[in-house]
Image (cartoon, rainbow, N blue to C red):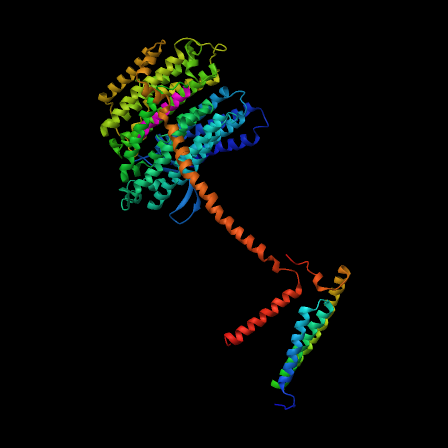
Amino acid sequence: MINSGIPLQYFLVLAAIMFFVGVYGFITRKNLITILMSIELILNSVNINFVAFNKYLYPDKLQGHFFTLFVIAVAACEAAVAIAIIINIFRRFNNIDVENVDEMKY
Amino acid sequence: MIDFGYTIWIPLIPILMFLFIGLTGHKYKPVISGYLGTLGLLTSAALSYYTAYQYFFNVGKVAGVYEKIIGFNVTWLRFTDTLHIDLGTLLDPISVMMLVVITTISLMVHIYSLGYMKGEKGFARFYAVLSLFSFSMLGLVLATNIFQMYIFWELVGVSSYLLISFYYEKPSAVAAGKKAFIVTRFADLGFLIGILMLSFITGTFDFKTLTDPNGAAIMQGGSAAFLGLSVMTWALLLIFIGGAGKSAMFPLHIWLPDAMEGPTPVSALIHAATMVVAGVYLVARLFTIFALSAPVALEIVGYVGGITSLFAAVIACTQNDIKRVLAFSTMSQIGYMMLALGVSGYGGEEGLGYMASMFHLFTHAMFKALLFLGAGAIIHAVHSNNMTDMGGLRKYLPWTNITFLIACLTIAGVPPLSGFWSKDEILVAAFEHNKFLFAIEFLVAGLTAFYMFRLYFNVFWGKDRHYHHAPHEAPPVMLFPLVFLAIASIFSGFIPFTSLVTSDGEAFHVGTEWIVAIPSVLIGLIGIAIAWIFYKKETAIPDKLASSFKLLYKGSLNKFYIDEIYLFVTKKIIFALISKPIAWFDRHVIDGFMNSIAFVTNFASEKIKGMQSGQLQQYAYVFVSGVVILAFVFIYLLKF
């Protein structure tokens, strides 16, 4: 066990705060770009958890790090797709307010 | 030993003719289809006569007993090794005799129709369906097993339906066709259930196995009982219901009088000589099993026959439609045949009734076809079915007059014409076994003579009516069948049936029982004499009698209201008391239940559809709150 001075709980609390900030943003913001940023916050909080657990619980293994790298790659792709969608929504509605996109209701 | 494989062609030729005429009949002149049909039947008839000769006089008899020979056989459906449905031809005395009867009558009707149906719309269709009928009927009598018989039984019903409603523009003909089909179809339901029961008990469909007097099939069926009768008896009674429907036995007879809406040659062929005796043939075919393992069923057959013959004879006395008189007369005579089977035992002289029944079937086919064809000639001449439109026709129709007279004398049982011999045998058989049925038949013999001569005198004697044009004798093509059948009626009584067609295949000898023959001839003559007094010149006696026996007369004239009873039962009882409540139940309870399910679903969806708002963030909010709540529940309440 490596004693790095900063306890694991700090990382977890930080990640939890980031996660709920992201969730709050996702639910309350109307601007699609802001929602996308909230999703990034959620993903990054998960990344911190991965790395922290990897470091503290299984320091001789690397799965947590690699998972994090994958999440970053997927997040980049997702951002590209989401922005493409947002541009199309803008072309159609002339704004990017999420409340306009309700075609799929009853 | 000759190979009887060719017998398959006897029914096959008519079906080929049916297909050919039916498919190409519109391409050439109608009369050609008539010639084609007749030619086909002629071939079949020639083959049948050859078969009859070979069977009866050359190869059929082995050690004094006529055997059942399978001429041709293919297995059509195989269920198990013992239970399989075959198609083929079975030759034994009754099937060979029926071959001769059917092809002869059918050929005569084919020839006759060339004249009678000339210029009718649908001439080719008529001949096509006539061929179909001949095929079905021949297939029926040649059936090797009861299931094949059932198939052809239904085919016969279909072709009968097609021919009864031949004039399909006439509503009464259409109604008559439907009635015949539905009534016989109901009876056939009994037949089908009977077949299933019989084959379940015995494990076979095959006639040869079923009717082997020493075989296992006869021994079965005594074990289980239902309502006091053995299962075998029930099976045979159900089969008899089918036979009774086809043979117009009381109370399933209501279709036969209406079936006279069809063309007259059809009535002669189907509703007098061949199809209506299918029921008799069916009982005769299963006679061994009837006689040896279900005598109760056989007794019921006898009583049904007796009741029908009396009932129909009484009605025939008051009918005015010439064809209906003949229709009721047919019913009465078929009743005779059924009765003869009912009073018969199995084997030797005990089997007198069986022989007499088949004998009467043969002679009856000849003289009843003659009567119908004669009636056709009369209708052809005066363009009416109604007896009150006829009178004094003997001057105009000399040939028809003579042949009709011969037929009337034959059915009245005047010796030495054929009707005398066969009816006498039936009366003897009844006399020996059941005095009550004998008394009925004795009375019916008198009634038969009376109503036939009432018809004869009314039509050919009496005053001339006002005809639109002078009635003219039928063309030779119609007279030839009349003369041929008249000769057959005279001489067919001399065929030695006792040595050809018997219940066990062995010949036996029976002398004429004068104690029965003389009274039966006398009562026939009395009937003729009464008709002579009443109807030769127009007198007031019939009217007076009618008014003094008003109830009987009215009842007879209205066929004892059996049709009305059927209508009452179906409309007032079944429709009003059963069908209507069921329909109400269906419409309100069943449909109501289903409708309320649909309504509740609809209502609920209408109420909750607002939840699907299309707002992404709302969904996310619900989702996250759900997760939080579940997490709370799992962690703090369930303590995982």
Query: How many marks are shown on the rendered structure?
Result: 0
Compared across the picture, whether B297 is left or right of A99 comes to left
Does residue B300 show up magenta in the picture? no
Q: Which residues are magenta?
A: B322-338
| Above or below: residue A77 compared with residue B589 | below
Residue A88 location, x and y as percent?
A: 75, 62
Residue B388 showing in the rendered view: yes
Residue B52 location, x and y as percent?
A: 38, 30
Q: Which residue is at 40% across, 12% downward?
A: B460
Q: Which residue is at 69% across, 75% downward?
A: A41
State the quadrant of the N terminus of chain B: top left
Residue B268 location, x and y as percent?
A: 42, 24
Residue B620 location, x and y as percent?
A: 64, 67
Compared across the picture, whether B119 is left or right of B354 comes to right
Residue B2 showing in the rendered view: no
Compared across the picture, whether B392 is left or right of B424 comes to right
Q: Name the magenta segment's main secondary structure.
A: helix
